[in-house]
Image: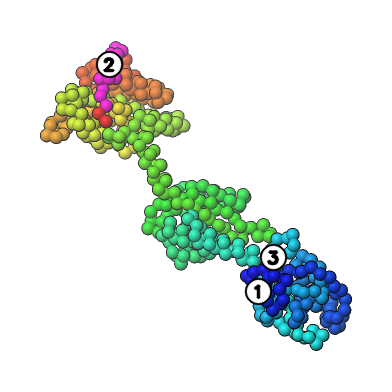
């Protein structure tokens, strides 16, 4: 736009096209357009209309011009009025005193006024339109340059537009998603199918849903996102569009999963650790209470690990523990859980059994598997194991109680000669007191 003119300069020297009225007086009554009808039209026009003669003197201004410039221009008739007289169209800044600047489109044409050459300017206030255009331009720039994926649908939830970040995150090109239902792009086999119904209900009732979604990339891989779905409503309150915004949190999610794994896995064997075992056992007990099931805990202690570890060194001992973990995983069912408590102590959660004898079968398989020799660094190592068995609900009703009973039963098995298993429910002599836990060395 053109800069502000200096209205003290003669009209021919006005360098810009920003208009304002100078001080002065005058009587508007007098010469002007002939005919009451034409005058009425000019006076009623919503567009500002100004006439300036060849000397730069204001000859006419309608009420809309006074409103646009924020002062009574009609009262300034006959005074100098800096004004560009070159015919054509342009856009100017208008500076009403004490008010915010406005923007007007101006069309200047030449005409004859009382036999003198003059210029007619018609100005239309486009401030709101320009502001809207600026907002739309800014919104378009935000849409194109946002780091978050953006997706816009129509009222029927058919995709209208996606931004470059959407393409970068998902791998889809615009032509591959335009016209597709929004639900197809939000759904994936990696999440609960009922979640889409939850989203639909929330958007319908509250106009918004926000949460974690696992989308499907174009290559089929999972894409973890923090997603917001917003309904854009029209004047009648009905949705006209839906806007989906999502931030790719895959790396954060993977890092979180790695940290969670480290917090719940034994670093040497990669088996679940004590904390993880407690969580799984607690969950299994809750299910058993609801369905009347039986759960068994097998406490496995290696019989001759300490002397082997002392004789061959911790490095060999670590490899033996890793081999023990692998054998235990291969021996039990997929539905069972093997964990390492520390040192040479392992524990097994056995589900889906009906009686003690079933747990005894699993325990004997464990003993047989660990009775076979291990071959580590040219050494043939014989370890063996003793197993204690506790049953829910007969031997305990919580995690600590069952683990304690299984531990005590394991010592009863050792008292009987090692390489055996014993039940917590067996009647007989009390087990020998536990030796200090310091005798079991954690080689991790």
The residue depicted at 42 percent of the width and 33 percent of the height is 283
Under tag 3, what secondary structure? strand
In the image: residue 248, left or right of residue 5: left
Residue furthest left as drawn? 378
Picture coordinates of residue 5, whole percent (x, y): 68, 70
Q: Is residue 257 above or below residue 143?
A: above
Image side of residue 311 versus residue 152, left or right: left
Q: Position of residue 307 (x, y in %)?
A: 18, 22
For label 2, the SS is loop
Residue annotated with mark 1: 15
For marks 2 and 3, give the CA distance.
90 Å
The residue located at (46%, 47%) in the rendering is 192
Nearest to N terminus: mark 2 or mark 3: 3
Position of residue 115 relative to residue 91, above or below, is below
Is the residue under label 1 in contact with that under label 2 (CB below 8 Å)? Answer: no
Task: Residue 189 in the image: state x and y as whole percent.
Answer: 42, 51
Residues at marks 3 and 1, CA–CA distance in whole angstroms? 19 Å
For label 1, count other residues whose C-alpha is less than 10 Å away and answer few (under 14), some (14-19) or many (20+). Answer: some
Q: Which mark is residue 435?
A: 2
The relative height of residue 147 versus residue 444 in the rendered view (above or below) is below
Query: Residue 345, located in which quarter of the rendered image?
Result: top left
Q: Are marks 3 and 1 in contact (CB under 8 Å)?
A: no
Q: Residue beneath label 3, please?
A: 102
Mark closer to the chain start, 2 or 1 = 1
> Which residue of the protein is positioned furthest toward the bottom in this rendering?
115
Q: Nearer the viewer, residue 255 or 408?
A: 255
Q: Is residue 423 visible?
A: no
Residue 408's place in the image compared with 340, above or below, is above
Q: Which residues are magenta?
A: 429-442
Quarter of the image with the N terminus in it: bottom right
Q: What mark, if any, has residue 255 been given in the picture?
A: none
**Which residue shows up at 31% across the image and 33% down it?**
266
């Amino acid at each position: 736009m053109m800069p502000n003119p200096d209205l003290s300069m003669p009209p021919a020297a006005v360098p810009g096209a920003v208009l304002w009225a100078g001080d002065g007086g005058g009587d508007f009554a007098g010469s002007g357009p002939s005919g009451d009808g034409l005058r009425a039209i000019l006076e009623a026009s919503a567009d500002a209309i100004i006439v300036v003669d060849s000397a730069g003197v204001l000859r006419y201004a309608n009420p809309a011009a006074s409103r646009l410039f924020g002062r009574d221009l009609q009262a300034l008739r006959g005074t100098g009025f800096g004004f560009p007289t070159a015919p054509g169209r342009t856009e100017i800044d208008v500076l009403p005193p004490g008010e915010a600047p406005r923007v007007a489109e101006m069309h200047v044409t030449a005409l004859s006024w009382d036999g003198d050459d003059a210029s007619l300017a018609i100005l239309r206030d486009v401030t709101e339109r320009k502001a809207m255009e600026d907002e739309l331009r800014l919104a378009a720039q935000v849409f194109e340059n946002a780091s978050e994926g953006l997706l816009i649908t129509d009222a029927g939830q058919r995709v209208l537009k996606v931004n470059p970040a959407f393409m970068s995150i998902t791998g889809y090109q615009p032509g591959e998603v335009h016209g597709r239902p929004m639900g197809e792009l939000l759904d994936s086999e990696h999440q609960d199918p009922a979640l889409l119904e939850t989203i639909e209900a929330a958007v319908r009732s509250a106009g918004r849903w926000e949460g974690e979604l696992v989308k499907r990339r174009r290559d089929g891989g999972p894409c973890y996102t923090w997603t917001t779905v917003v309904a854009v409503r029209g004047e009648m309150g009905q949705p006209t569009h839906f806007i989906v915004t999502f931030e790719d949190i895959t790396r954060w999610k993977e890092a979180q999963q790695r940290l969670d794994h480290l917090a719940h896995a034994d670093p040497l064997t990669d088996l679940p650790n004590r904390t993880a075992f407690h969580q799984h056992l607690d969950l299994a007990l809750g299910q058993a209470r609801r369905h009347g099931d039986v759960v068994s805990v097998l406490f496995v202690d290696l019989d001759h690990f300490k002397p082997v570890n002392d004789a061959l060194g911790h490095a060999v001992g670590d490899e033996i523990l890793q081999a023990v973990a692998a054998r235990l995983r291969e021996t039990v069912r997929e539905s069972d859980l093997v964990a390492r408590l520390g040192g040479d102590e392992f524990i097994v959660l056995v589900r889906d059994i009906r009686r003690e004898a079933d747990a005894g079968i699993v325990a004997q398989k464990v003993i047989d598997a660990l009775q076979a020799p291990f071959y580590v660094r040219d050494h043939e190592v014989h370890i063996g194991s003793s197993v204690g068995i506790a049953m829910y609900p007969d031997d305990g009703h919580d995690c600590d109680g069952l683990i304690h009973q299984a531990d005590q039963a394991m010592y009863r098995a050792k008292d009987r000669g090692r390489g055996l298993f014993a039940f917590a429910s067996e009647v007989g002599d009390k087990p020998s007191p536990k030796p200090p836990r310091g005798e079991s060395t954690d080689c991790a």
